[in-house]
Image (cartoon, rainbow, N blue to C red):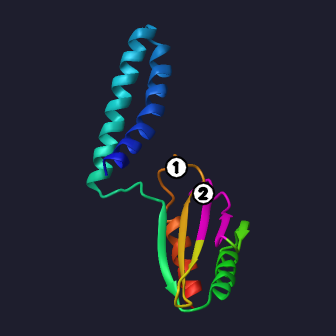
């Protein structure tokens, strides 16, 4: 939780710091503009971080889920390929030997794109464990309006059919 608040704090305060410094530089001396910009930006960033944490806002947008399938590895791998294709994304990596699939989602209004990773593991009983991960393409993105959650949900529902 602390990391989430720091991420929100710095993401909101740094651009506001820069804006205030540029704005007040045109009216006052540079040292005074920096002072006002830093205090104002950090105050605004801190205030927003506190408000968003009280409302339960989270920046945890790396969503993953594991599921066990009662099907052989080859059939599970084929289902996972079909599940990723059903999202309308392009598969960048398809390694059947290591059990890894990677795809990248398009840029949308909510994010700069997602990375969808599926890893498969064989079990001794002839079953297959599948881990689905959806995360933002940019590591510093703090919100995605639920796109990664929807990706994981759709893939898991598809492979469970």
Across and down, in percent, residue 155 comes to 58, 78
**Residue 74 lies in the magenta-colored region:** no
Spatial separation of the CA atoms under disc 1 and disc 2:
13 Å
Judge the density around disc 2: few (<14), some (14-19), many (≥20) Cα neighbours within 10 Å: few
Judge the density around disc 1: few (<14), some (14-19), many (≥20) Cα neighbours within 10 Å: some
User: Relative to 146, is 85 above or below?
Assistant: below
Across and down, in percent, residue 82 comes to 69, 81
User: Relative to 94, is 37 above or below?
Assistant: above
Please identify, in this view, whether the residue under mark 1 or under mark 2 is nearer the observer: 1
Name the outermost residue toward the left: 54
Identify which residue is drawn at 41% across, 43% down.
7
Q: Which residue is mark 1?
A: 141
User: Relative to 17, is 118 above or below?
Assistant: below
Q: Quadrant of residue 158?
A: bottom right
Q: Which residue is mark 2?
A: 109
Element type at mark 2? loop
Across and down, in percent, residue 96 comes to 70, 74
> Which segment did they paint magenta?
98-118
- 12 left or right of 147 in image: left
């Amino acid at each position: 939780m602390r990391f989430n608040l720091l991420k929100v704090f710095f993401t909101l305060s740094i651009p506001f710091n820069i804006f205030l410094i540029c704005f007040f530089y045109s009216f006052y001396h540079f040292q005074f503009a920096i002072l006002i910009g830093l205090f104002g930006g950090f105050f605004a960033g801190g205030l927003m971080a506190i408000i968003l944490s009280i409302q339960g806002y989270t920046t945890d947008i790396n969503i993953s889920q594991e599921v066990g399938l009662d099907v052989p590895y080859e059939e599970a791998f084929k289902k996972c390929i079909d599940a990723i294709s059903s999202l309308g994304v392009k598969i960048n990596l398809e390694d059947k030997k290591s059990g890894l699939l990677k795809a990248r989602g398009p840029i949308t209004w909510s994010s700069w794109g997602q990375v969808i990773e599926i890893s498969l593991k064989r079990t001794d009983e002839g079953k297959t464990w599948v881990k689905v991960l959806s995360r933002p393409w940019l590591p510093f993105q703090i919100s995605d309006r639920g796109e990664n959650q929807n990706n994981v949900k759709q893939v898991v529902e598809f492979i469970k059919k």
